[in-house]
């Protein structure tokens, strides 16, 4: 039996490997000249393959957040580790339970996946961008250079529209739409956020550890503590990227106010007492200098100006009430964000093929028998830290099986 996989990313290569292992004659069509381009840039070129918390469903989202449950249950964290260990990948754990290859090279992951496909006889066609197709009697796919490919089973794993500079587009989704499927609204996810606060540009390039929170509609509070990066357009860093997947939907209708605690886990009262102790030891110092060794001057100077405090004021002249106000400002600094950066700066696409139209146990289309979906094409996205790759490995595995076998 013949299977074609469209897309040579993480999910597509996984689907091709699984289908070939089960005896299928597999052809993989990749529109670019290189396989695994998103793998290669992930984790700053090191590839955050998965996460020790990958089996926890709270990290996976979509319009139907429970859709991913069956897929993730069929290919769990232990299965991912066993698969890559068998290929020759050893893992190292880093902060937030992220797992990276010991080689620190994403290229090694792509090389081993390519090698496995070669060993299994997968026919890989590069620069084979699918432009249209027919699903009336089996599948016929036509690519940009005029070639056509036929199969009786098709896996669409051509990804979303994030990181368009790598060749990402919605051609795979459009093909599914031509065959009757619906695509939910597409939005950038795991993406830096734009802020109208002009003074932030003075902090450009500064990275700090902070607690960032936001109040969502309905009163739900979301929070993350990690690196926060200031840029000339707004904010980025691990905290922002991770929160963005939940903030982007709200940013479509209104600005959102982020609350930043520069002293994670500490209250205004604790910070006020800490400042009092510092100021009592060195009462002659200016307010700005009193933060030396505690906070970056690149942060303190524009922040004090923004809050309206005199930087040169001697701390011995600052009364308790003002000290309390400063402590409150440092633990609940408000920064407004107005929207996400464009798709080319997003790590994932929020949205995709409507999951009402896909069998959650097999990832086969309810509308077109023999058509399967995997990876970022589906309306499933996950938190930062290897969870989106876990969805790619799991969905690729399930889609690679004929009728879930």
Image (cartoon, helix red, strand yellow):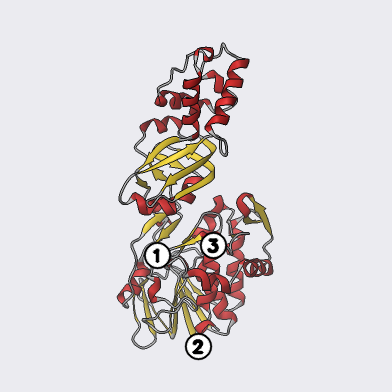
Percent across and percent down for residue 136 are 33, 86
Q: Identify the residue shown where x is 60% and y is 14%.
A: 282
Q: Which residue is mark 3?
A: 389
Residue 167 seen in the figure:
no
Q: How many marks?
A: 3
Give the structural element (helix, strand or loop) at label 2.
loop
Any part of residue 147 in sight: yes
Residue 146 placement: quadrant: bottom left
Report the disc number at residue 63. 1
Percent x, y for residue 32?
A: 44, 64
Mark before the other along the chain sequence, 3 or 1: 1
For mark 2, what is the residue? 1
From the viewer's perspective, is 30 left or right of 179? right
Task: Judge by depth and name the residue closer to the eye, 73 or 128.
Answer: 73
Residue 216 or residue 389, whichever sits in front: 216
**Viewer-side label of 2, 3:** 3
Relative image position of residue 389 (x, y in whole percent): 54, 62
Q: Quadrant of the C terminus?
A: bottom right
What is the CA distance from the residue labelled 1 to the residue labelled 2? 34 Å
SS type, badge 3: helix
Mark found first going from the N terminus, 2 or 3:
2
Mark 3 vs mark 1, foreground winner is: 1
Dividing the picture into quadrants, the one containing residue 145 is bottom left
> Is disc 1 in contact with disc 2, using a CB cutoff of under 8 Å?
no
Percent position (x, y) of residue 212?
49, 42
């Amino acid at each position: 039996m013949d299977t074609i996989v469209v897309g040579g990313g993480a999910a597509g290569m996984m689907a091709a490997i699984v289908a070939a292992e089960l005896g299928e004659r597999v052809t993989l069509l990749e529109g670019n000249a290189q396989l695994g381009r998103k793998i290669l840039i992930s984790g700053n070129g090191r590839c955050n393959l998965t996460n020790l918390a990958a089996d926890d469903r709270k990290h996976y989202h979509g319009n139907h957040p429970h859709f991913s449950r069956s897929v993730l249950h069929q290919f769990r964290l232990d299965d991912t580790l066993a698969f890559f260990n068998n290929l020759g990948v050893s893992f190292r754990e880093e902060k937030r339970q992220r797992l990276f290859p010991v080689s620190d090279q994403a290229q090694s992951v792509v090389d081993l996946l390519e090698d496995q496909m070669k060993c299994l006889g997968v026919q890989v066609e590069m620069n084979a961008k699918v432009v249209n197709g027919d699903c009336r009697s089996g599948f016929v796919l036509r690519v940009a250079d005029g070639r056509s490919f036929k199969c009786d089973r098709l896996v669409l794993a051509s990804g979303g529209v994030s990181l368009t500079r790598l060749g990402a587009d919605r051609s795979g989704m459009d093909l599914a739409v031509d065959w009757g499927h619906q695509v939910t609204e597409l939005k950038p996810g795991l993406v830096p956020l734009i802020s109208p606060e002009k003074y932030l540009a003075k902090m450009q390039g500064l990275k700090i550890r902070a607690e960032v929170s936001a109040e969502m509609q309905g009163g739900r509070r979301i929070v993350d503590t990690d690196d926060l990066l200031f840029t000339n357009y707004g904010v980025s860093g691990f905290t922002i990227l991770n929160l963005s997947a939940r903030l982007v939907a709200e940013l479509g209708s209104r600005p959102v106010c982020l609350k930043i605690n520069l002293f994670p886990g500490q209250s205004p009262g604790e910070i006020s007492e800490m400042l009092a102790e510092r100021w009592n030891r060195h009462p002659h110092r200016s307010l700005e200098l009193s933060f030396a060794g505690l906070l970056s001057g690149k942060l303190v100077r524009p922040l004090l100006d923004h809050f309206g405090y005199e930087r040169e004021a001697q701390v011995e002249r600052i009364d308790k009430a003002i000290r309390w106000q400063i402590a409150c400002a440092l633990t609940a600094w408000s920064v407004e964000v107005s929207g996400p950066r464009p798709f080319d700066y997003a790590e994932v696409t929020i949205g995709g093929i409507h999951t009402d139209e896909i069998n959650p146990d097999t990832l086969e289309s309810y509308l077109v028998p023999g058509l399967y979906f995997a990876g970022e094409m589906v309306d499933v996205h996950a938190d930062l830290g290897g969870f989106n790759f876990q969805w790619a490995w799991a969905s690729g595995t399930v889609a690679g099986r004929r009728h879930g076998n």
